[in-house]
Image: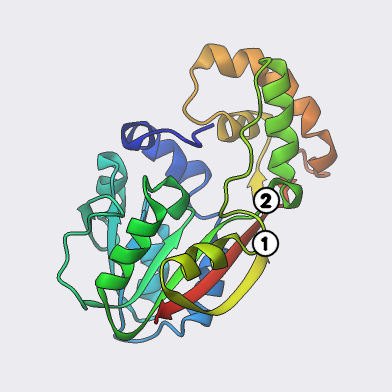
Amino acid sequence: MVDGVDAQGWSDVAVGWAELWGSFAEPAQDALIAASAIGHGMAVLDVGCGSGEFLARLRRVGAEPVGADPAPHMVAAASVHADVVLADAERLPFESGRFDVVTAVNALQFAGNTPAALAEFARVLAPGGRIAIANWAEGAHNDIDVIERAVAAALDEEQLPDGPLRPAGGLEQAMTDASLEVLSTGIVDVPWRAAGETVLVRGILLGEDAATMAELHSVIVEAAAPFRTSDGGYVLRNAFRWAVARPR
């Protein structure tokens, strides 16, 4: 599990992330594309672009995407889809007013300073532009929460609480506090599929060593039993909240 790790930690799991999780947020990405009217010729910056799947999706709808991510191996992976720079959300190496839309999917919660990141998104935005954010909804909406709770109990650890951006109204409040006007919001189903037990355990414990995966294999499989499909795979039904805003 990679929640809360630093940029180097994300860099270390870049290959596994691209394989196991890279495309799972497509429904949230599509919601942002529609809500912010991204289309042909629009300059779009995806902050925290990870392994770059959203960049490829943006290019397919005719946009001109650029990525930014603080993890070096994520930048390397994403660079096959578009120009990508190594940068933190709070310090973007672009001139003011360059982009029509700034997006961040499953990324804003990792910024060290959320207000500073949103202010930087606004700085690089062209007049009339949009800021479009999506991230995990609160745990009650996510099957993966059931499994993470079981893992935490097996390790005698406290499960990480929901961050302030996850509950209903969290994104809107952060945007309002950053002097942004919220234009639209929503919640979208974002399922994650695993082909079998091995993929399930690798995905849940991404970044952990082989010994930890072996130790927790049965815990994860037992917790995931309600989500097992008839073909031996698993479908975890999760949700992302999203919001689109503009500078006031």
Residue marked by disc 2? 138
Which mark's residue is nearer the viewer, 1 or 2? 1
Q: Is residue 112 left or right of residue 165?
A: left
The residue that appears at 27% across and 50% down in the rendered structure is 88
Q: Position of residue 10 (x, y in %)?
A: 38, 37
Q: Secondary structure at mark 2?
A: loop
Q: Say few, some or many: other residues with alpha carbon within 10 Å of mark 1 (under 14 / 14 to 19 / 20 or more).
A: some
Q: Is residue 101 above or below residue 91?
A: below
Residue type, label 2: Glu
Q: Say few, some or many: other residues with alpha carbon within 10 Å of mark 2 (under 14 / 14 to 19 / 20 or more).
A: many
Q: Position of residue 130 (x, y in %)?
A: 40, 79
Callout 1 touching callout 2 (CB < 8 Å): yes
The quarter holding residue 119 reads: bottom left
Q: Earlier in the sequence, mark 1 or mark 2?
A: 2
Q: Position of residue 201 (x, y in %)?
A: 62, 29
Residue type, label 1: Ala
In the rendering, which numbered label is found on residue 34? none
The residue that appears at 77% across and 34% down in the rendered structure is 224
Q: Position of residue 202 (x, y in %)?
A: 56, 30
Q: Quadrant of the C terminus?
A: bottom left
Q: Is residue 203 above or below residue 82?
A: above
In the rendering, which numbered label is found on residue 168? 1
